[in-house]
Amino acid sequence: MKKQRWRARDYVVIPRSLLTQKISPSALRLWIALASYCYDSDSCFPSNRAIMERMPPGTALNTVKSAKRELEEQGLIRRERRFDKGRETSSVYILLYLRGLNYWRVTIRLPLVITRRLPPRVMATLPH
Protein backbone atom coordinates (compact mmCIF):
# COMPACT_ATOMS: atom_id res chain seq x y z
CA MET A 1 0.00 0.00 0.00
CA LYS A 2 1.39 3.36 -1.03
CA LYS A 3 1.69 6.03 1.67
CA GLN A 4 -0.08 9.29 0.94
CA ARG A 5 1.04 12.68 2.15
CA TRP A 6 -1.32 14.75 4.21
CA ARG A 7 -2.71 17.78 2.47
CA ALA A 8 -3.75 20.93 4.30
CA ARG A 9 -7.47 20.17 4.08
CA ASP A 10 -7.15 16.52 5.14
CA TYR A 11 -6.87 17.28 8.86
CA VAL A 12 -8.13 19.64 11.53
CA VAL A 13 -6.19 21.15 14.43
CA ILE A 14 -8.20 21.41 17.63
CA PRO A 15 -7.39 23.24 20.87
CA ARG A 16 -6.27 20.87 23.62
CA SER A 17 -8.70 22.51 26.06
CA LEU A 18 -11.59 21.27 23.93
CA LEU A 19 -10.77 17.72 24.99
CA THR A 20 -11.37 18.57 28.64
CA GLN A 21 -14.82 20.09 28.04
CA LYS A 22 -17.78 18.09 29.32
CA ILE A 23 -19.59 17.73 26.02
CA SER A 24 -21.16 14.78 24.26
CA PRO A 25 -19.26 12.84 21.60
CA SER A 26 -21.72 14.17 19.00
CA ALA A 27 -20.98 17.76 20.02
CA LEU A 28 -17.23 17.15 19.81
CA ARG A 29 -17.59 15.57 16.36
CA LEU A 30 -19.75 18.50 15.24
CA TRP A 31 -17.15 21.03 16.45
CA ILE A 32 -14.48 19.13 14.51
CA ALA A 33 -16.73 18.94 11.43
CA LEU A 34 -17.31 22.70 11.57
CA ALA A 35 -13.58 23.31 12.03
CA SER A 36 -12.94 21.31 8.87
CA TYR A 37 -14.87 23.98 6.93
CA CYS A 38 -12.92 26.91 8.43
CA TYR A 39 -10.15 27.48 5.91
CA ASP A 40 -7.97 30.41 7.06
CA SER A 41 -10.81 31.70 9.20
CA ASP A 42 -12.60 31.26 12.51
CA SER A 43 -15.99 31.02 10.86
CA CYS A 44 -17.77 28.95 8.25
CA PHE A 45 -21.26 28.55 6.84
CA PRO A 46 -21.85 24.93 5.77
CA SER A 47 -25.40 23.76 5.14
CA ASN A 48 -26.95 21.06 7.31
CA ARG A 49 -26.50 18.66 4.39
CA ALA A 50 -22.77 19.47 4.18
CA ILE A 51 -22.39 19.02 7.94
CA MET A 52 -24.17 15.66 7.79
CA GLU A 53 -21.67 14.48 5.15
CA ARG A 54 -18.85 14.92 7.68
CA MET A 55 -20.64 13.12 10.50
CA PRO A 56 -20.61 9.33 10.97
CA PRO A 57 -23.06 7.40 8.75
CA GLY A 58 -26.46 7.04 10.34
CA THR A 59 -26.26 10.28 12.35
CA ALA A 60 -29.72 11.83 12.56
CA LEU A 61 -30.37 15.48 11.78
CA ASN A 62 -31.92 15.88 15.25
CA THR A 63 -28.62 14.67 16.77
CA VAL A 64 -26.77 17.41 14.86
CA LYS A 65 -29.31 20.04 15.90
CA SER A 66 -29.04 19.09 19.58
CA ALA A 67 -25.22 19.07 19.29
CA LYS A 68 -25.40 22.62 17.88
CA ARG A 69 -27.51 23.72 20.85
CA GLU A 70 -25.09 22.04 23.24
CA LEU A 71 -22.06 23.76 21.68
CA GLU A 72 -23.83 27.12 21.83
CA GLU A 73 -24.83 26.60 25.47
CA GLN A 74 -21.24 25.65 26.35
CA GLY A 75 -19.93 28.73 24.53
CA LEU A 76 -17.92 26.68 22.02
CA ILE A 77 -19.64 28.09 18.94
CA ARG A 78 -21.61 31.20 18.17
CA ARG A 79 -24.23 30.88 15.45
CA GLU A 80 -25.45 33.81 13.40
CA ARG A 81 -28.49 33.13 11.27
CA ARG A 82 -28.45 34.50 7.71
CA PHE A 83 -31.35 35.42 5.45
CA ASP A 84 -31.57 36.00 1.71
CA LYS A 85 -34.75 37.63 0.37
CA GLY A 86 -36.62 36.68 3.51
CA ARG A 87 -35.57 33.02 3.42
CA GLU A 88 -33.16 31.54 5.93
CA THR A 89 -29.91 30.28 4.42
CA SER A 90 -27.07 28.43 6.12
CA SER A 91 -25.99 29.93 9.43
CA VAL A 92 -22.52 31.33 10.05
CA TYR A 93 -20.71 29.37 12.78
CA ILE A 94 -17.93 31.07 14.74
CA LEU A 95 -15.66 28.60 16.55
CA LEU A 96 -14.75 29.43 20.14
CA TYR A 97 -12.91 27.66 22.93
CA LEU A 98 -12.26 28.29 26.59
CA ARG A 99 -8.74 29.07 27.79
CA GLY A 100 -8.49 29.92 31.45
CA LEU A 101 -11.52 32.07 32.19
CA ASN A 102 -11.69 33.64 28.74
CA TYR A 103 -13.21 32.55 25.46
CA TRP A 104 -11.06 32.81 22.36
CA ARG A 105 -11.87 32.76 18.67
CA VAL A 106 -10.09 30.06 16.73
CA THR A 107 -8.47 30.97 13.43
CA ILE A 108 -7.15 28.01 11.53
CA ARG A 109 -4.24 28.89 9.26
CA LEU A 110 -2.42 25.68 8.70
CA PRO A 111 0.02 24.71 10.04
CA LEU A 112 -0.73 27.18 12.87
CA VAL A 113 -3.77 27.90 14.99
CA ILE A 114 -4.01 31.58 15.84
CA THR A 115 -6.26 32.70 18.68
CA ARG A 116 -7.71 36.05 19.65
CA ARG A 117 -9.31 36.92 22.97
CA LEU A 118 -12.94 37.95 22.63
CA PRO A 119 -13.90 41.51 23.56
CA PRO A 120 -15.67 42.00 26.94
CA ARG A 121 -19.05 42.82 25.31
CA VAL A 122 -19.04 39.42 23.57
CA MET A 123 -17.70 37.64 26.67
CA ALA A 124 -20.72 38.93 28.63
CA THR A 125 -23.06 36.94 26.37
CA LEU A 126 -21.27 33.59 26.86
CA PRO A 127 -21.63 31.15 29.78
CA HIS A 128 -19.10 31.38 32.61
Image (cartoon, rainbow, N blue to C red):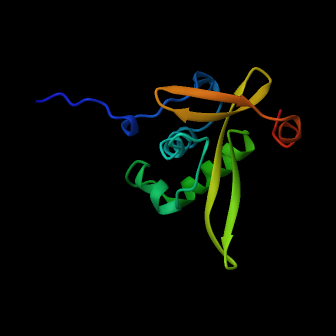
* Left or right of 2, for residue 15: right
Q: Position of residue 115 (x, y in %)?
A: 66, 28
* Left or right of 94, for residue 46: left
The N terminus lies in quadrant: top left
Q: Residue furthest left?
A: 1
Q: Position of residue 120 (x, y in %)?
A: 88, 35
* Left or right of 71, for residue 41: left
Image quarter of residue 107: top right
Q: Is residue 18 visible?
A: no
Please report the residue visible at 70 percent of the width from the left and 79 percent of the height from the top: 86
Asked whether 36 or 57 is in front, the reply is: 36
Asked whether 20 or 81 is in front, the reply is: 81
Q: How many marks?
A: 0
Please report the residue visible at 88 percent of the width from the left and 39 percent of the height from the top: 124
Please report the residue visible at 71 percent of the width from the left and 30 percent of the height from the top: 116
Q: Is residue 80 visible?
A: yes
Please report the residue visible at 60 percent of the width from the left and 56 percent of the height from the top: 65
Asked whether 102 or 8 is in front, the reply is: 8
The C terminus lies in quadrant: top right
Q: Residue furthest bottom?
A: 85
